[in-house]
Amino acid sequence: MIAEETLKILTESAKYDVSCSSSGSGRKNTGGIGNGMPDGCCHSFTPDGRCVSLLKLLMSNDCIFDCKYCMSRRSCDVPRAGATPEEICELTVDFYKRNYIEGLFLSSAVQKSPNYAMEQLVRTVKLLRTKYNFHGYVHLKGIPKADYELVTEAAKYADRMSYNVELPSEKSLRLLAPQKSKESLLLPMKLLQREKAEFSAEKRKGFFLPAGQTTQMIIGASPERDGQILRLTQSLYRVTGLKRVYYSSYIPVVEDSMLPAMQSPALREHRLYQADWLLRFYGFDVEELVPEGEDLPLDVDPKCAWALRNMHLFPIEINRAPLEALLRVPGIGAKSAQKILTARRYTTLNFEHLKKMRVVLKRARHFITAGGKFYGSDDTATVRGLLTAAEQPKNAKQLSLFDAPSVLFSLPSGREAALAALTGEL
């Protein structure tokens, strides 16, 4: 069993990796324990309100690499610890049986050599599946520069794998992570994507990364602008078929003259996630969102910023506009757009209908008409001011699950927000 102090060191070292949220796996339980079906993992919420989580730790934090931003780097004076594959398997199964976790997120520092570290990860996940008969969700971090045979072997047992790009340019990698290279990170992603496609085409028995791949970029440790970061993101989605790109605001966990002294703003990370969502689900291209040498605006979200730059395209009539146009209206999300398409087959929609569909009218009213009526402003400066004011948190209040309904319904956000809190839809 892993000693408590060792476990504390290994979990503390793993907490900065954020690329481990929902699973989307299709792994079935064939008589063992655990469930890797697509209900979400790592403090995500399932549609029925359940919270599911992962055990998240490193096998070892004793690294031969010297990445400037990493607290496990070779030159960093921190306590070192490690665990064997058997210890991690026993801990995972024990925690699962106690209902602490529903899966495992396992990474490792580059201990001794890339191949040695990858061999230990492969051995662990293989033992979990074969000896301990664990069928729950397993996310494995790939080790840069490890042999590809080890990588493909791991992919046969893990639900998801990830190689963290870490920094948005090869120049920054050479400066802050000299043992890593663009090729050592991108090549395994491309090879795994190709192998997965071949596996599916040939209809082989078993699983090969059923939940796909993810990656992570550190934001603010290097000088790249949001435009460059999002262009890399779009390229990764198109070339490697990633499920998600995660963004992590730089936190100065170690001191180094090559690194910023201050933490990167969390709002910048939030804007990048919003832009990423627009790229994946709303039909936007990165060229529409931000120039390569610029950052996303912080005062309004990327969708509002695009709409403000293109006021000549608005307002649109919600009873006639196609789906592609509706998705570009601030305040109308993907679900709301589908509701509009369905409802307008039976009636002419007005603003009261949109309110019941939970369209955010304080944003959308400046960009739409409903039955020919317009309740917004057509002055760009005025609209920007109103949208900026709407994002200010001064009127925000945490909704309680235990207040009386009369108290909840009297809040500024109204009956809909109160019901959303009670049903877990916030």
Image (cartoon, rainbow, N blue to C red):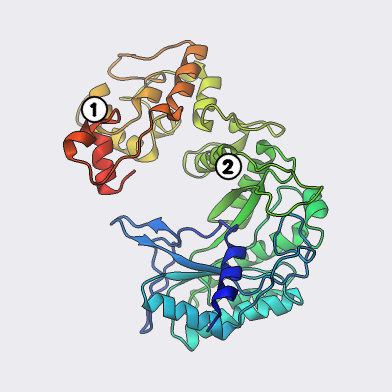
Which residue corresponds to the image point at 61% horizontal and 32% vertical from the top-left?
296
Q: Label 2 crowding class (10 Å Cα cut-off): few <14, some 14-19, many 20+?
A: many
- List the single residue furthest toward the top: 379
User: Tag 1's secondary structure?
Assistant: helix
Quarter of the view holding residue 7: bottom right
- Mark 1 or mark 2, earlier in chain: 2
Residue 155: x and y, percent? 57, 73
- List the single residue furthest toward the bottom: 131
**Residue corresponding to mark 1:** 353
- Quarter that holds the C terminus: top left
Q: Nearer the viewer, residue 233 or 94?
A: 94
Residue 155 visible at all: no
Q: Label 1 crowding class (10 Å Cα cut-off): few <14, some 14-19, many 20+?
A: some
Disc 1 marks a residue whose amino acid type is: His
Residue 243: x and y, percent? 53, 56
**Residue corresponding to mark 2:** 269
Residue 78: x and y, percent? 71, 66
Query: Looking at the image, is 34 positioned above or below residue 262?
Result: below
Nearer mark to the viewer, of 1 and 2: 2
Residue 425 visible at all: yes
Q: What is the CA distance from the residue labelled 1 to the residue labelled 2?
A: 34 Å
Query: Looking at the image, is 116 positioned above or below residue 191?
Result: below
Horizontally, residue 145 falls left or right of residue 274, namely right
Which residue corresponds to the image point at 71% horizontal and 46% vertical from the top-left?
221
Residue 59: x and y, percent? 62, 74
Disc 2 marks a residue whose amino acid type is: Glu
Q: Nearer the viewer, residue 84 or 279?
A: 84
